[in-house]
Image: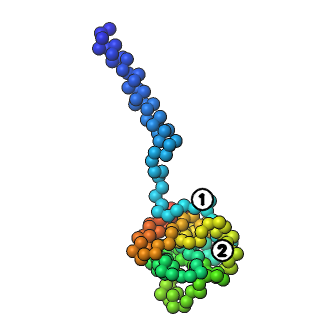
Amino acid sequence: MSEAAVKKKSKTPLIMFIVFVLPVVLAYLALTFDWFNKGSTNKGELLTPPLDLSSVVSDREPLWRLLFVMPQECAQGCENVLYSLNQIWVALGKESDRVEPLVLAHQTSEKIELTDMQRHPNIKVLSTDEQNVNNVFKDASTDGIFIADTLGNVILKYPIKLQQEDAIQQSRDILADLRKLLKLSRIG
């Protein structure tokens, strides 16, 4: 056997190791040490475990819901949320009959003026008591816009934006997530 053939034969196991074993080892290390951003495409914060809204909306039609809990004082951020909920619902177009923009109001919430709701005619207001809201959100913050599925599970949360430009951008993110959910959903 020539010297070149012996060198070639000795390189074969090394090449086989590099081609087959090394990628598996690198993938294992990448998963173990979180070297990459995991493949999530949602723009909101995924709530794990989901919050159970079914006790509050049990008598309502099973729809996807854009949910907002009315705070004690409705400042600029609150106005941005009401505007965003209305605009998202309008932007859904033919899918809008599958989604209900819903504001939960309780005893300590700021009373929603009739004029505010005339500016946002598509938003429904559900009055409930504060205990029901506390049972749903438990230790979680109620500050934000939430997406709830048709079974009453609150699954995504978006923070309230104080600047109108930021709120508009966030509305686009919520709309993208909601469209994706509606496309994948066969119910509601």
Left or right of 28? Residue 69 is right
Marks 2 and 1, how far apart in space?
Answer: 18 Å
Residue shown at 68% from the left, 77% from the top: 130
Q: How many numbered circles does the render carry?
A: 2
Q: Where residue 95 sits in the image (x, y, percent)?
A: 48, 73
User: Which quarter of the image is occupied by the C terminus?
Assistant: bottom right
Looking at the image, can residue 159 be seen? yes
- Above-or-below relation of 98 to 46: below
Residue extending farthest bottom? 115
Q: Quadrant of residue 135?
A: bottom right
Identify the secondary structure beneath mark 1: strand
Mark with earlier residue (2, 1): 1
Characterize the local packing of mark 1: few (<14), some (14-19) or many (20 or more) Cα atoms within 10 angstroms: few
- Above-or-below relation of 162 to 39: below
Q: Give amino acid for label 1.
A: Thr
Q: Residue beneath label 2, please?
A: 133
Q: Residue beneath label 1, please?
A: 48
Q: Give amino acid for label 2.
A: Val
Residue 96 badge: none
Identify the secondary structure beneath mark 2: helix
